[in-house]
Image: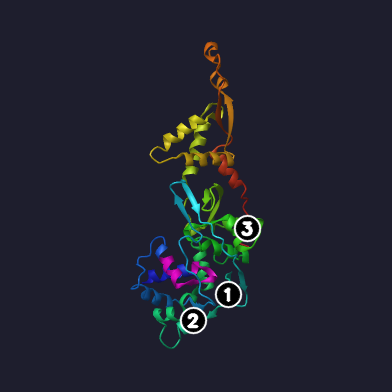
Amino acid sequence: MEEHKQICMDEIALEGLDGITLESLWFRLQDRKPPFRLPIDEYSKPFVWELITSLHQVKFYELPTARPPITASDGAKEFSEELATYVWFDQKAEPLQMISDEAKGIRGCSGTYHTRQDITSEVRPENGDILSITEAEKRYGGKLVIVASPEARLDALMGLSGDTRAEMSLTSYCTLEYIGKSRHNGRLQTELASALKIDAKGAHYVRRILTSSGIVTKQHLSYFVNTTSVMKAGRILLLSRFHNKLFNTYQFLMEKVSNYLEMQPGRETSLFNIREFLLSIMKDKGFSQQKAKKFYELLKSSGLTTFFMRSRSELYGKLDETKARGRQDRQIRMVKLLKTYAEYTQELDDQEKPEPSACK
């Protein structure tokens, strides 16, 4: 029972100052990694509700209007076998409202902080019976939200890394909270500026503070957004407690091609040889023409390679005069390595100069 209670506390705390509705909590528990040991159904929900109402580090609020439940596509990604990489669901979420209530020692992101009503005494009266889940759902529906205390929220965000006593600016804390709500999905760095209403430079600075402190991890990743066919390269940010290595097919192939070209004379070879090499390591994995085209685009856009034309005679030597009579000197498409995959990733990391101090 204690383990179930801690898990519920963790999921509520990770939702930040905005809190979580019951419908969204059921989704979070079902989607949790590692899995929640109880099936979420009509039999278990009353039991989980009893656990939640016994948590004295949470309060209950009524929103002005019902909040839509979380769905699988909210800020999520999925691995596409067809594209051989991750696809992010493009969500145009409304900018978050940063809150700093110094009198109560409360900060975080919430658009309803000043309009919601504290109903803790109605749900969990000091003298009297706790409201049943049936009555709570009937009375409040999707307007009921559960919010964890500032201490519980900070503990959930910090995990085993960082110092929970570290002082952070409001922007740094709200960024941390925003990243934490995504759990194992993580957030793209490009999302920070629009979500927190800060400019790109400010988002970059705050992210550097959080990663240098070890509270947040970053990874370089090639990905698609589900509303476009253009491959992008960016950084994904996760809480350290949720860190997991995301190494997609394209990054695997970039490293392999880099190593292959590095061993070729002049660090170059024909595109035909590159295709044959890719097919040899991707056989039985369905490496389609579409995937190959996307991969070549990534090789060029990353600056890892350059593509150019070279005459066949220059590459293989002049043809015998008799054989060459009446034939054009065919052009062959070539690929040249400009920098190794290790150099490429190092360049990306070199852009991240660590801050002299941690979370300030």
Q: Earlier in the sequence, mark 2 or mark 3?
A: 2
Q: Residue furthest top?
A: 322
- Quadrant placement of the N terminus: bottom left
Pick the front one: 82 or 164: 82
Query: Quick one: label 3, few (<14), some, or many (20+) residues within 10 Å?
Result: many
- Between disc 3 and disc 1, whose residue precedes? 1
**In this picture, is 10 found above or below 222?**
below
Q: Does residue 28 show up magenta in the picture?
A: yes
For the residues labelled 2 and 3, the Cα–Cα distance comes to 36 Å
Where is residue 209 shown, x and y percent of the image? 61, 57
In the rendered view, tell whether residue 252 sits above or below residue 163. Answer: above
Q: Is residue 83 above or below residue 1?
A: above
Give the secondary structure at mark 1. Answer: loop
Residue positioned 50% across, 82% down in the render: 119
Q: Earlier in the sequence, mark 2 or mark 1?
A: 1
Residue pointed to by mark 3: 203
Q: Residue at x 42, y 36 (%)?
A: 281
Per the rendering, the mark at residue 120 is 2
For badge 2, the amino acid type reads Thr
Please tell me the numbered disc located at residue 113.
1
- The answer to whether residue 212 of the structure is visible from this angle is no
Which element is circle 3 on? Answer: helix
Which region of the structure is painted magenta? 13-29
| In front of the other: 49 or 164 | 49
The image shows residue 151 at horizontal and vertical percentages of 52, 71
Question: In screen coordinates, is 281 left or right of 308?
Answer: left
In the rendered view, does 255 fall on the left or right side of 204?
A: left
Could you say whether the residue bearing mark 2 is in a helix, strand or loop?
helix
- Relative image position of residue 316 (x, y in whole percent): 53, 20
